[in-house]
């Protein structure tokens, strides 16, 4: 008689034929204790993956005050200043947001076959966007309660206008 996945042999002995029956650290893989350990490990892994995403909010729906704070840190970083951990996180948030915003807008315009509302140079990067945003915020303090994504859109439209 052929054993399949731990079934009884003709001699009456149970043999580990499945990968789930081979022990790991003295505990069979199919035991309730091993299943509980796997569930706990999966829960910890998910918590480790999700917690940073929940802790770090995006910048789009924050106001101009937060945009100014993060992009001022980015400007300091670009100038070569050494920043605290919090300021470094702010700088990274601004740089990533501006880079993603500009290239996402460009991709969306290309995909729809429409003209862009701002026309950055081919060599455009966050190094161009940070001063444009800070200049715009400095020139329009009355708009500091506006959402960051609208302010970035306005700043880039002013700094990099499209010519007809």
Image (cartoon, grey):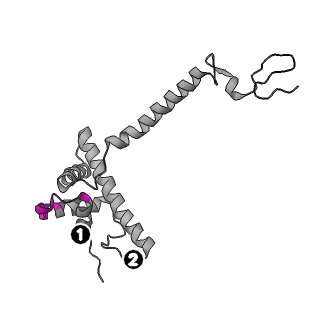
Q: What residue appears at the point 13 percent right and 64 percent down from the top-left corner?
A: 140
Q: Residue furthest left?
A: 142
Could you tell whether 142 is left or right of 17 in the image? left
Q: Quadrant of the C terminus?
A: bottom left
Q: Secondary structure at mark 2?
A: loop
Question: Can you give x and y, in whole percent of width and height, for residue 82 in the image?
Answer: 24, 42
The residue tagged with tag 1: helix, strand or loop? helix
Residue 130 placement, left or right of 125: left
Q: In terms of image quadrants, where is residue 150?
A: bottom left
Q: Nearer the viewer, mark 1 or mark 2?
A: 2
Return the residue at label 1: 159
Q: Earlier in the sequence, mark 1 or mark 2?
A: 2
The number of numbered discs placed on residues in the rendered structure image is 2
Left or right relative to 82: residue 23: right
Can residue 58 be found in the magenta stretch? no
Q: Residue at x 42, y 35 (%)?
A: 48
Magenta span: 137-148
Where residue 35 appears, x then y in whole percent?
57, 26
Q: Position of residue 97 (x, y in %)?
A: 32, 55
**C-alpha separation, residue under disc 1 versus residue under disc 2:** 20 Å
Q: Which residue is mark 2?
A: 114
Which one is nearer the viewer's eye here, 77 or 47?
Answer: 47
**Dot 1: few (<14), some (14–19), or many (≥20) neighbours within 10 Å?**
some
Q: Residue at x 70, y 28 (%)?
A: 19
Residue 72 in the image: state x and y as whole percent. 20, 52
Instruction: Farthest residue to the bottom: give it.
Output: 164
Vertical comparison of 157 with 19: above or below: below
């Amino acid at each position: 008689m052929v054993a399949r996945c731990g079934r009884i042999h003709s001699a009456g002995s149970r043999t580990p034929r499945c990968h789930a029956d081979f022990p790991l650290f003295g505990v069979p893989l199919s035991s309730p204790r091993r299943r509980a350990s796997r569930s706990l490990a999966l829960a910890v892994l998910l918590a480790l993956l999700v917690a940073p995403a929940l802790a770090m909010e995006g910048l789009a729906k924050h106001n101009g005050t937060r945009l100014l704070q993060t992009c001022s840190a980015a400007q300091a970083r670009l100038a070569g200043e050494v920043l605290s951990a919090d300021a470094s996180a702010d700088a990274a948030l601004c740089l990533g947001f501006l880079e993603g915003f500009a290239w996402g807008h460009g991709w969306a315009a290309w995909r729809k076959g429409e003209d862009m509302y701002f026309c950055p140079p081919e060599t455009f990067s966050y190094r161009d966007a940070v001063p444009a945003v800070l200049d715009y915020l400095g020139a329009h303090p009355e708009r500091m309660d506006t959402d960051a994504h609208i302010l970035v859109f306005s700043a880039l439209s002013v700094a990099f206008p499209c010519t007809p």
